[in-house]
Amino acid sequence: MRKLRIGKRVVSDNDHFVVAEIGHNFGGGPGRVERATDLICEAKRCGVDAVKFQKRDNRTLYTEAFYNKPYDNENSYGATYGEHREALELSFEEHAALKEVADGNGLLYFATPFDAPSVDFLERLGVSLYKVASGDLKTIPLLRLIGQTGKPVIMSTAGGTMDDIKRALDAIGHSNVAVLHCVAIYPTPPELMNLRCISTLRDMLSNVIGLSDHFDGKWHIPLAYMLGARIFEKHFTLSRAQKGTDHRFSLEPSGMKAMVED
């Protein structure tokens, strides 16, 4: 039987595991920790199993030129892309405080690291699960570093071939990995959801299979479950009208609650 072990929790074909992807939907500037706290508490009321954030070491991840590139648009929190990203980056103390909120609500708290310093950061924080973004499916050094922690991994696969996926699994180096079908179009049109990839992944791999979703809605979630997906990652927001690029394909609390019930 397919299994993903996360501490005492075992996700299998007889189970399901729902992740509210908070990401940076708490926004930048004053009050971001309070907004993130509200998102965690609302996610709990929706019945999800986990909340996921993102972690970047921006000076490591971006070139100097890209970091200082002007970033003037309605979603910007700074004059340059670097300033924008820094405004959305939580400190260790802020992550620790939010993890305590999640722990107190019985939710698993984890994050996607985008670089090696962020893996070290999350290890110090004490996360029990890692997420690999589709963009790092071919970043072998990062995959190896995440694998060396020995923690379970959820890996998205947008843009990857089956060879890419198998190479990534080899790089992680252990079998406690779930593989998520994903389409990297934000939001994803229904005709490009390609849900049959879930069946293909189940045929080709022995891992737990899931769906990392960027569709604007939730109607397809029961279909994905019937095709064999057992882990569901969905962007979550308190209001789709908020400033930011991810809110428009995120679910608000009423939608997330209905998705979990479905």
Image: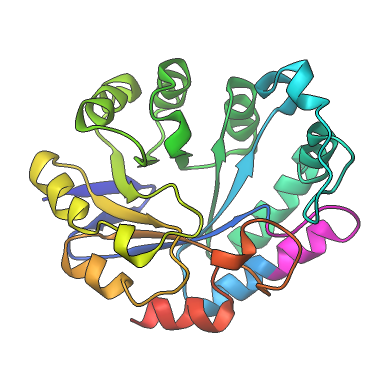
Could you tell me residue 207's position as x and y percent? 20, 43
Colour option used:
rainbow
Q: Start and end of the magenta stretch?
A: 25-38
Could you tell me residue 120's position as x and y percent? 61, 25
* Figure check: 21 above or below 82: below
Taking depth in this image into account, of 105 and 52 the one nearest to the observer is 52
Q: Quadrant of residue 248?
A: bottom right
Taking depth in this image into account, of 173 and 262 the one nearest to the observer is 262
99 on left or right of 9: right
Say whether residue 105 is visible. Answer: no
159 on left or right of 89: left
68 on left or right of 223: right
Q: Quadrant of the C terminus?
A: bottom left
Say whether residue 26 is visible. Answer: yes
In this figure, what is the number of numbered marks?
Answer: 0
Query: Is 31 within the magenta?
Result: yes
Q: Image point 41% across, 35% down: which residue?
A: 151
Q: Quadrant of residue 21?
A: bottom right
Could you tell me residue 76's position as x and y percent? 81, 49
Q: Image point 69% across, 19% down: which residue?
A: 60
* Figure check: 104 above or below 64: below
Query: Is 259 within the magenta?
Result: no
Q: Image point 76% across, 44% down: which residue?
A: 90
Could you tell me residue 150's position as x and y percent? 39, 28
Q: Image point 59% across, 25% down: which residue?
A: 115
